[in-house]
C-alpha cells in the first residue's frame, strides 16, 4: 500500500509543480539552459553575504544534499524494488541522517524568524475572520501572496514533521519499545517521511521561485 | 483401528500388564513367551506392542522413515558420521535427501552394515527393518532378525531400560543381535551371546542348548505373573532421559576444556518443567514435530505450526483466538530489537546453543560420538570433529524464508570420484580400506582419536593407487578442498570446491533464558568488528596440515560480503553519537517550534485582548 500511495503522491507533487511552473511563470529567463544556470547560481554563496549568511547558506546546501541522499536511499528500495532498506543503502541513509538532523536544527534556529507568519501572508483569512467573528481585525486589500504563505507553511511543516520523523527511529534504538511498537514506529517513519519529502520539495521549489522574483 | 490407537480421553496412564510374543520363523506372530523356556526367543515389539497399537502406522514416523524415499526430507538434520582417522575419512551419511550428505549405499554400506554401525542410537525400524533383496543378505537377516521399532527405547519409564549399557541395546546392535536388541534393553530380560560369534549353522528358530555362543534370552521369571503376563512401565509421553540418549550434546573448547554436566545449565524449557515431548509432539503416526519455521508447509503435521518457538511464544497472527503463550510460554516483547532481526534470524540465533566464542568449539553429540554407550573415547579431539555454533544462512525454506541460525558443522573428508557434472561420489569403503589402507600403512593412529596426520605426498600416492585400481578420476576431499592428480601425476587442489563444502545442521537446544540471549544487553555483542557472530573464525578441519591451518570467517557462511559486514559493524562505534545528535537536533527543533508557537499564541491573545 505504501508503495502505491508514495509513488502516486510523489508523482502528483512533481506534476503539480510542473503545471504550476508552466501556468504561472516566475519571470526568469525563458531559455531552459539559461534558466537552469540561473537556478544553479542560486545555490552559490553570494560574496556580499555575511559570515552568518554564508554559514546559513552552506547549512542549507548541506541539508539539501543530505535530503537528496536520504530520499534516494530511503525511497529507492521501497518504491522501486519493493524491499526494506538494507545493506549499503542503509549505511548511507544512517550516515547522512544525523547530518541532516543537525542542519535542520541550525536552519530551524536561523530561519524561523524570517518564516514567521505576518498579517499580509493571508489577507483572505483575516477578512474571513473579521466577517465571521465581527472583531476589529485589520484587513489588507493587497492580493494574496500565495507562494510566500505556502513557502512558510512548508517550512513549519518540515520542522513539525521532523520531530516524529527523527524520534520514530531514535526511540527504536533504545530498549524501550517492543516488537509491535517497533513495527509502528517504522511505519510512522515511512509515512511521515513521505509527507516530509513532499513538504521539502514544495518548500525548495517555492524558495527557488521566490528567489527568482526576489520576494525572499 | 486397534485398542490402543485412540485415546478414550482419560488422562490417566494406561497400565500395561501384557503377554509377550515372539516373531515366528515365517515372520508372523509367534507363541507367547514362556520365561521358563531356557531357549525362549526374544519378544517382538511388532507382535507384542502391535497387539494394541498399529505398528504399521507407527513405523512410518519420523524416527523410522528415513529409508522411505516418499517422505519429504525436510530441513537438513544431523547425519550419521562415519569416520576413520587412519584413512582420513569423516563422511556425513543419511538416507534422507539432504544436500551435502551421501547415501550409505554409495559408500558401500549395506542396510545391515549401516544398522550395525549406527543402529546403537536408532530406536529401531528404518534401515534395520528393510527386507533385503539379495539372497545372502536375506539369509543373514533370517538369523539376525530385523531391528524392529524399539517402543521401549522411548516409552519405557522403568529405570532399568538399558540403551547403552554393557549388555544393553547398543551393544546388541553392534553384535548384529537385531532380533534380541529390544528385549536386551528392557529390565526383565538378559541376552547373552551374539549372532556374529554363533556357529554358521545357527538357526534361531531351532536353537541348540549346546550352542553357547549364540544369542540366548533369559527372562526374569519374577516379572511374569501367573498368566505369563508382564507389567511394563509404559508411558505415553517419553521421559526426557529417553530422548537424551540419542539427543545429548557436549561442547568442548579448543584448549580442551569441557562443559561438565554439573556446571552447565539445562535447556530453559526443562528448567521450567516441560519435557521434550511437550513441544516435539506426535500422534499415532509418530510424525513427530521437529519444530522449525516452515515445517508445517512440508510435513503436513497439523501441530507443526503451533508447537514451534513461534507457535508457543507468539502464536498465530490474526484471528480471534489467542494462541501465543501456550504452556506458559512468555510472550516476548523484544524491547529495542529492530524488527529486521526477526526477518533474518531464527529464534535460535539469539536464544540457543553455546554462547558464541571467537572460535566455534568442538561439539560432541550422542549419535556422532556414541555418547552414553560403553568405552566411549572422552578425549576432546576425538573424531568426528563437529564445530558449533556456526551461524549459517539456511537454504530457502518451504515458507520462503532463509534465515541465519546457529549450526553444527562438519567438514567431510573422503576418497571419491568425480562425475561428469563435477560432482563427487565417495568410493566404497571396502575399496578404500583395501587400496588406500595399503598405501597408508605407515600412518600411525593417534591415541586421542584425532586425525592421523596425512601428507600431500601420501594423498598423491593413494590417488594414484586408486586410479591404478580402476577408479576413474579419483579425488580426495577434505576441509572444503578437493585434491586430484594432474596428468603428470602431481597433486593439485581446488579450494572451496562446491562438492567439498561443509555440511551443517541447525542447533536448536539448549535454549538459554531470555536474559542470556544475544543482544539482550548491547547491540555490539554481534555488531562489532570483533564479534564472534560475524567475525568468529571457524576452523577448517582436515588430516592434512596445510588445509587444517585454514579458517573461515562466520560471515562467509552467512553469504554476507566482507566489506558490507565490516562497515556495518564499524558503524556501531558512531551509533551513540547518532543518538546524541538526533536527540539534540530534535530538542532544538522542538524548542523553536514551541517558542514560535507561543509567540503565535501571544499574538492571538493580544489581538483578542485589544478587542475589549
Image (cartoon, coloured by chain):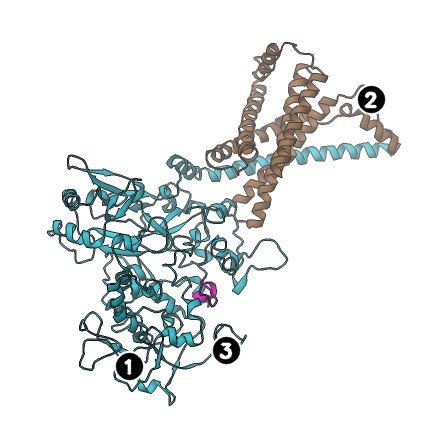
Chain colours: A brown, B cyan
* Element type at mark 3: loop
CB within 8 Å, label 1 to label 2 = no
Image quarter hosting the C terminus of chain A: top right
Q: CA distance from mark 3 to mark 2?
A: 91 Å
Which quadrant holds residue B128? bottom left
Judged from the image, the secondary structure of the residue bearing numbered disc 1 is loop
- Residue B347 visible, this angle: yes
| Residue to which mark 2 is pinned | A140
Chain assignment, label 1: B
Query: How far across and down, in percent of the image, does residue B233 sit?
Result: 40, 78
Give the chain of mark 2.
Answer: A
Viewport quadrant of the N terminus of chain A: top right
Residue at 62 percent across and 37 percent down: it is A192
| Residue that carries the numbered disc 3 in the rendered image | B12
Q: Which residues are magenta?
A: B276-288
N-terminal of the two: label 3 or label 1? 3
The residue closer to the viewer here, B209 or B283, is B209
- Whether residue A216 is visible, yes or no, is no
Q: Residues within 10 Å of mark 2 (few under 14, many from 20)?
A: some
| Residue at the left extreme, as displayed | B442
Give how far across and how far down residue B188 sits, in percent: 32, 80
Circle 1 packing at 10 Å, graded few (<14), some (14-19), many (20+), is many
Q: Toward which corner of the image does residue A209 lie, by quadrant?
A: top right
Asked if residue B37 lies left or right of residue B73, the reply is left
How far across and down, in percent of the image, does residue A53 sit?
59, 19
What numbered label is drawn on residue B40? 1
Q: Nearer the viewer, mark 3 or mark 2?
A: 3
Amino acid at each position: 500500500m505504501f508503495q502505491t500511495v508514495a509513488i502516486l503522491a510523489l508523482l502528483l507533487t512533481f506534476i503539480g509543480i510542473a503545471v504550476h511552473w508552466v501556468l504561472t511563470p516566475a519571470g526568469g529567463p525563458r531559455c531552459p539552459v539559461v534558466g537552469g544556470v540561473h537556478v544553479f547560481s542560486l545555490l552559490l554563496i553570494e560574496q556580499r553575504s555575511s559570515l552568518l549568511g554564508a554559514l546559513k547558506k552552506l547549512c542549507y546546501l548541506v541539508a539539501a544534499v543530505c535530503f537528496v541522499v536520504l530520499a534516494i536511499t530511503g525511497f529507492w528500495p521501497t518504491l522501486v524494488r519493493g524491499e526494506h532498506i538494507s545493506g549499503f543503502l542503509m549505511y548511507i541513509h544512517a550516515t547522512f541522517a544525523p547530518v541532516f538532523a543537525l542542519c535542520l536544527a541550525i536552519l530551524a534556529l536561523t530561519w524561523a524568524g524570517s518564516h514567521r507568519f505576518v498579517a499580509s501572508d493571508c489577507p483572505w483569512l483575516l477578512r474571513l475572520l473579521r466577517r465571521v467573528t465581527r472583531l476589529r481585525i485589520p484587513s489588507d486589500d493587497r492580493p494574496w501572496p500565495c507562494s510566500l504563505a505556502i513557502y512558510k507553511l512548508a517550512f513549519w511543516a518540515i520542522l513539525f514533521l521532523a520531530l516524529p520523523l527523527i524520534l520514530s527511529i531514535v526511540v527504536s534504538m533504545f530498549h524501550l519499545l517492543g516488537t509491535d511498537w517497533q513495527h509502528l514506529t517504522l511505519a510512522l517513519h515511512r509515512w511521515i517521511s513521505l509527507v516530509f519529502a513532499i513538504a521539502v520539495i514544495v518548500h525548495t521549489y517555492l524558495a527557488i521561485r521566490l528567489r527568482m522574483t526576489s520576494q525572499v | 483401528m486397534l485398542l490402543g490407537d485412540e485415546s478414550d480421553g482419560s488422562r490417566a496412564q494406561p497400565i500395561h500388564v501384557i503377554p509377550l510374543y515372539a516373531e515366528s520363523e515365517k515372520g508372523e506372530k509367534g507363541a507367547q513367551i514362556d520365561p521358563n523356556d531356557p531357549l525362549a526367543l526374544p519378544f517382538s515389539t511388532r507382535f507384542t506392542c502391535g497387539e494394541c497399537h498399529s505398528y504399521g502406522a507407527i513405523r512410518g514416523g519420523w524416527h523410522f522413515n528415513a529409508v522411505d524415499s516418499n517422505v519429504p526430507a525436510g530441513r537438513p538434520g544431523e547425519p550419521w558420521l562415519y569416520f576413520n582417522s587412519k584413512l582420513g575419512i569423516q563422511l556425513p551419511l543419511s538416507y534422507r535427501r539432504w544436500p551435502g550428505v551421501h547415501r550409505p549405499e554409495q559408500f558401500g554400506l549395506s542396510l545391515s552394515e549401516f544398522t550395525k554401525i549406527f543402529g546403537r542410537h536408532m530406536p529401531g525400524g528404518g534401515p534395520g527393518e528393510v527386507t533385503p533383496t539379495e539372497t545372502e543378505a536375506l539369509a543373514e537377516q533370517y538369523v539376525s532378525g530385523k531391528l524392529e521399532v524399539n517402543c521401549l527405547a522411548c516409552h519405557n519409564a522403568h529405570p532399568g531400560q538399558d540403551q547403552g549399557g554393557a549388555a544393553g541395546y547398543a551393544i546388541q546392535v553392534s553384535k548384529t543381535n537385531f532380533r534380541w536388541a529390544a528385549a536386551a534393553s528392557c529390565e526383565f530380560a538378559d541376552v547373552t551371546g551374539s549372532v556374529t560369534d554363533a556357529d554358521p549353522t545357527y538357526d534361531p528358530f531351532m536353537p541348540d542348548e549346546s550352542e553357547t555362543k549364540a544369542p540366548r534370552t533369559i527372562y526374569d521369571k519374577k516379572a511374569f505373573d501367573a498368566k505369563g503376563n508382564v507389567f511394563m512401565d509404559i508411558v505415553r509421553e517419553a521421559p526426557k532421559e529417553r530422548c537424551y540418549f540419542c539427543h545429548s550434546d557436549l561442547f568442548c573448547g579448543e584448549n580442551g576444556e569441557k562443559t561438565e554436566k554439573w556446571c552447565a545449565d539445562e535447556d530453559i524449557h526443562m528448567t521450567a518443567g516441560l519435557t521434550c515431548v511437550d513441544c516435539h509432539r506426535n500422534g499415532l503416526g509418530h510424525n513427530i514435530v521437529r519444530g522449525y519455521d516452515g515445517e508445517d508447509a512440508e510435513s503436513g503435521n497439523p501441530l507443526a505450526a503451533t508447537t514451534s518457538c513461534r507457535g508457543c511464544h507468539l502464536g498465530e497472527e490474526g484471528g480471534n483466538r489467542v494462541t501465543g503463550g501456550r504452556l506458559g510460554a512468555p510472550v516476548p516483547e523484544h524491547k529495542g530489537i529492530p524488527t529486521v532481526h526477526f526477518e533474518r534470524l531464527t529464534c535460535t540465533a539469539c536464544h540457543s546453543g553455546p554462547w558464541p566464542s571467537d572460535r566455534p568449539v568442538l561439539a560432541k553429540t550422542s549419535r556422532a560420538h556414541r555418547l552414553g554407550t560403553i568405552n566411549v573415547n572422552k578425549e576432546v579431539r576425538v573424531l568426528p570433529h563437529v564445530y558449533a555454533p556456526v551461524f549459517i544462512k539456511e537454504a530457502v525454506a518451504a515458507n520462503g524464508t532463509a534465515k541465519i541460525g546457529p549450526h553444527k558443522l562438519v567438514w567431510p573428508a573422503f576418497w571419491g570420484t568425480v562425475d561428469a557434472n563435477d560432482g563427487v561420489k565417495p568410493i566404497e569403503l571396502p575399496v578404500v580400506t583395501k587400496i588406500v589402507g595399503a598405501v597408508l600403512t605407515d600412518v600411525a593412529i593417534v591415541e586421542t582419536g584425532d586425525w592421523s596426520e596425512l601428507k600431500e605426498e601420501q594423498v598423491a600416492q593413494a590417488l594414484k593407487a586408486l586410479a591404478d585400481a580402476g577408479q576413474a578420476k579419483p579425488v580426495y576431499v577434505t576441509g572444503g578442498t578437493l585434491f586430484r592428480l594432474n596428468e603428470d601425476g602431481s597433486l593439485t587442489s581446488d579450494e572451496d570446491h562446491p562438492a567439498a563444502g561443509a555440511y551443517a545442521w541447525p542447533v536448536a537446544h539448549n535454549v538459554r533464558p531470555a536474559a542470556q540471549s544475544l543482544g539482550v544487553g548491547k547491540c555490539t555483542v554481534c555488531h562489532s568488528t570483533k564479534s564472534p557472530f560475524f567475525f568468529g573464525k571457524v576452523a577448517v578441519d582436515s588430516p592434512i596440515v596445510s588445509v587444517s591451518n585454514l579458517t573461515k570467517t562466520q560471515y562467509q557462511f552467512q553469504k554476507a560480503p566482507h566489506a558490507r559486514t565490516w562497515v556495518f559493524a564499524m558503524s556501531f562505534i558512531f551509533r551513540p553519537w547518532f543518538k546524541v545528535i538526533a536527540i539534540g537536533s530534535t530538542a532544538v527543533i522542538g524548542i523553536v517550534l514551541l517558542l514560535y508557537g507561543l509567540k503565535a499564541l501571544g499574538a492571538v491573545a493580544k489581538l483578542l485582548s485589544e478587542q475589549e
